[in-house]
Amino acid sequence: MTQYTPEQSSVVLAIGGIDPAGFSGLQADIKALHSIGAHCYTVPTAMTAQPAQAGEPAQVYPVSTEEFVAQLNACLSHERPSAIKVGLMPNQGLAIALKNWIGEHNLTEIPVVYDPVFANTLNKSLLVDPPQVIVERLLPITTLMTPNLLEAALWSEQIATEDADLSKPETFARQWRKAGAQQILVKGGHSDDSSSTDSNMVSDYFIGLGTGGPQAFWVSTPKLPLNQPCRGTGCSLASLIAGMMGFGYSAADAVVIAKQRLQEALFAPLSFGEFLKPNFQAIKPATISSTEAAQIPLEKLPSVHFPSQPYHFNFPSCGDSPLGLYPVVDSAEWIERLLSLGVTTIQLRAKNLKGEALEREIQSAIAIAERFNTRLFINDYWELAIKHGAYGVHLGYEDLQTADLHQLEKHQLRLGLSTHCHYELAHALSVKPSYVASGPVFHTNTKDMPWRPQGIDGVSYWRKLVDCPLVAIGGLNESHFKALCEAGADGIAMITAITHAKDAEGTTQRFMDIIKSAVNETYDQKTL
Ligand SMILES: Cc1ncc(COP(=O)(O)OP(=O)(O)O)c(N)n1
Ligand SMILES: Cc1nc(C(=O)O)sc1CCOP(=O)(O)O
Ligand SMILES: [Mg+2]
């Protein structure tokens, strides 16, 4: 599994055209990247002249291959870039030169975000060679492509199979993947089609590698009532994605964070002449720390959902009393032991049972929890949880692909969801669960985790994003309880600290007391 470990700095090599009017191309890249604290190298592929008047074509003056490579080398003589963003690539000669340069300098591990600019927002062509040949050259070095619907269509028409429906972003995305794109975000900003998405939202379709394997999802932000054409949004989005990938975020995470930041810059767009442009000055400037660059001062994360339909769920609440100490155990026997001490939230995480034995264990656990009037969550086995009338289920991100959320909602089970990164959180929040779990807070020996522990700061940050109860999990023990309560955790979940304790009963009692007084102290501090 890839481990995504955010770095302290992001240096993006932005390659693209110069738009002297300052709306798009490298000028837009610089503004977007500076807003997240990334450094931006700028290597022009062409000077352009893009008149405002609709009738006049754009002029494109590509640099020579020699000039291009000399600029790339000059950048490389400073620090090695942590991501590359490619915008306007006007001809295949420069595309080949870039591909060779990346190979010759062993830069193939660096993520490349390619925004295939074929024409500007005013639909003026900016290419000297046909788009197909340029894209073909760049596909092998590209980590993530970000075409808009028109660009995607232009290419897809060349490669589409006969039965392909070319009116939908998801069709294009699949076509491009077949043609060799590793990961792709088809931007739906030009779409009139609202059949698969909410018409008040702009929805982009992502297919790529998530932390646990291939992912496909829609990522949507509210449609803004802009009264003039807005320029430079595609360049800015691709730059923000490259910047976040440069900080070490996965493509899926970078897309979610970048969409949010662009959305924020578009809430108060700057108007210049006939056009608008994203207002990155309106965003709280990010510092050079990667976590802070991702820390969105927040409107809201974009909504993320799987390819079927947007979600309209509302799972029941877990009640008014705080979730508190939340032991995660593997048997009904443990549940009986801990509930008799007064534990009010507990989870059955039975990884070693199957078939009838598993079903019996779940049934007993539910019967015990009912006797103690306790919130019992069943991990993984949502069908058995429904069948035996459990209080709730806890699901991981992968389970969302298979679990029938409609059935869970229909039977009024509470739903807890694990989250570890931005796109998982964006997805979880779209489901409106009963609680969100955030982990791993610290290193855990209980299971392999592809995510860097996020620490207490990560819990505080999640708290700002999450509008339902928040549960912290991963490597937790009593030394963390006070800080976790101050950070806003409603529940503190753990396995080892209780199940491996010499005196599990005594330990649990002490943990409950500490959490109770930490919750009271935090409450007092907030109300003073
Ligand atoms: C409270 C809580 N948070 C997170 C998890 C992890 O659940 P999941 O992602 O389903 O992983 P497994 O527990 O199945 O390994 C949890 N169980 N409880
Ligand atoms: C099961 C589990 N899920 C996690 C997550 O981050 O989603 S961390 C974790 C293990 C928790 O065990 P312990 O308290 O022994 O560290
Ligand atoms: Mg699970």
Image (spheres, rainbow, N blue to C red):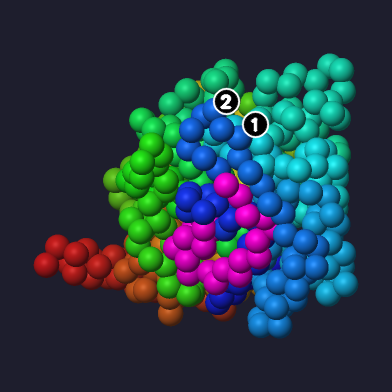
The quadrant of the image that shows the C terminus is: bottom left
What stretch of residues is rendered in magenta? Answer: 27-49
Q: Which residue is located at x 84 percent, y 28 percent?
A: 158
Relative depth, front residue between 103 and 72? 72
Helix, strand, or loop for circle 1? helix
Q: Is residue 404 left or right of residue 273?
A: right
Which residue has dot 2 on it? 191
N-terminal of the two: label 1 or label 2? 1
Circle number at residue 295? none
Q: Is residue 162 left or right of residue 192?
A: right
Check residue 523 for magenta coloring: no
Does the residue at mark 1 contact the one at mark 2 (Cβ under 8 Å)? yes
Q: Quadrant of residue 154?
A: top right
Q: Which residue is located at x 25 percent, y 68 percent?
A: 522
State the count of labels.
Answer: 2
Q: Residue furthest left?
A: 528
User: Between marks 1 and 2, how big is the CA–CA gap?
Assistant: 7 Å
Check residue 40 for magenta coloring: yes
**Where residue 71 sits: x, y (%)?**
71, 71
Which residue has dot 1 on it? 149
Which amino acid type corresponds to the residue marked 1 in the rendered image?
Answer: Leu
In this rendering, the answer to whether 527 lies above or below 88 is: below
Relative depth, front residue between 484 and 147? 147
Helix, strand, or loop for circle 2? loop
